Amino acid sequence: MIGSLLADGIGDTIRFSLTADPVEEARAGRVLLESFGLRERKNVDLIACPSCGRAEIDVIEVASRARDALADEQLPLQVAVMGCVVNGPGEARDADLGIAAGRRRGHLFVKGQNVAVVPEDEMVPTLVDWARFIAEHGAEAALARADTEVARREAEKDRAELLEIQGDDANASEQRVELISQRFD
Ligand code: SF4
């Protein structure tokens, strides 16, 4: 609601109320204004997938670590933390940079293109290193320094393995629809 008012140019100031430290209120207000392009982006806009039956990591925990690690960096980038390599790079292809989990590895991508693969416990530090590089040199330079073909092949391998293990319907949506229809019959 407040977002659409701001987008229409209505309002001069905002006040965010959260049941949290006032620092979080200021941060939330700043993120909202930066998201609408009403304030020059000076900080990371961290986005994360909602998580689902395909998630290979605890998305909330990893996103929270990434947010803390990037909090004081002042990098004007959108950075994505995605739960799986099956759909993550595609779902976050508009982000400057992101990482998606798969088979205990982290698949780093820049503008939707795979650029590197790291062990799962290196996902957050790797994200920070690449974010710093992109903020300084740009996404094109990051893509140029990467072996995108190897990264793409590795991502495709993990993606295929996950599809094999999880199947096409990792969220068991057909059974859920069936269950709901039975309850409302
Ligand atoms: S499909 Fe993957 S990236 Fe998309 S919400 Fe589920 S875990 Fe996250």
Image (cartoon, grey):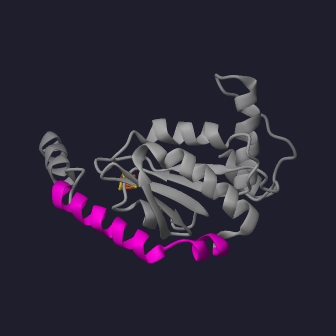
- Measured as percent of width and height from the top left, residue 101 is found at 39, 52
Residue 52 located within the stretch drawn in magenta:
no
**Residue at 47 percent of width and 74 percent of height:** 148
Quarter of the image for residue 91 reads bottom left
Pick whichever, 87 or 174, lies toward us: 87
90 left or right of 70? Answer: left
Q: Quadrant of ligand 1?
A: bottom left
Quadrant occupied by the C terminus: top left
**Residue at 44 percent of width and 42 percent of height:** 121
Pick whichever, 129 or 138, lies toward us: 129
32 left or right of 102? Answer: right
- Measured as percent of width and height from the top left, residue 140 is found at 65, 75
Looking at the image, the residue that sits furthest to the right is 12
How many marks the image carries: the answer is: 0
Task: Determine whether 47 is above or below 90 in the image.
Answer: above
Pick whichever, 19 or 4, lies toward us: 19
**Residue at 47 percent of width and 63 percent of height:** 116
- Measured as percent of width and height from the top left, residue 39 is found at 82, 54
Could you tell me what secondary structure mostly forms the magenta stretch?
helix
Looking at the rendering, the stretch of residues picked out in magenta corresponds to 140-167
Residue 143 located within the stretch drawn in magenta:
yes
- Measured as percent of width and height from the top left, residue 2 is found at 70, 45
**Residue at 56 percent of width and 46 percent of height:** 125
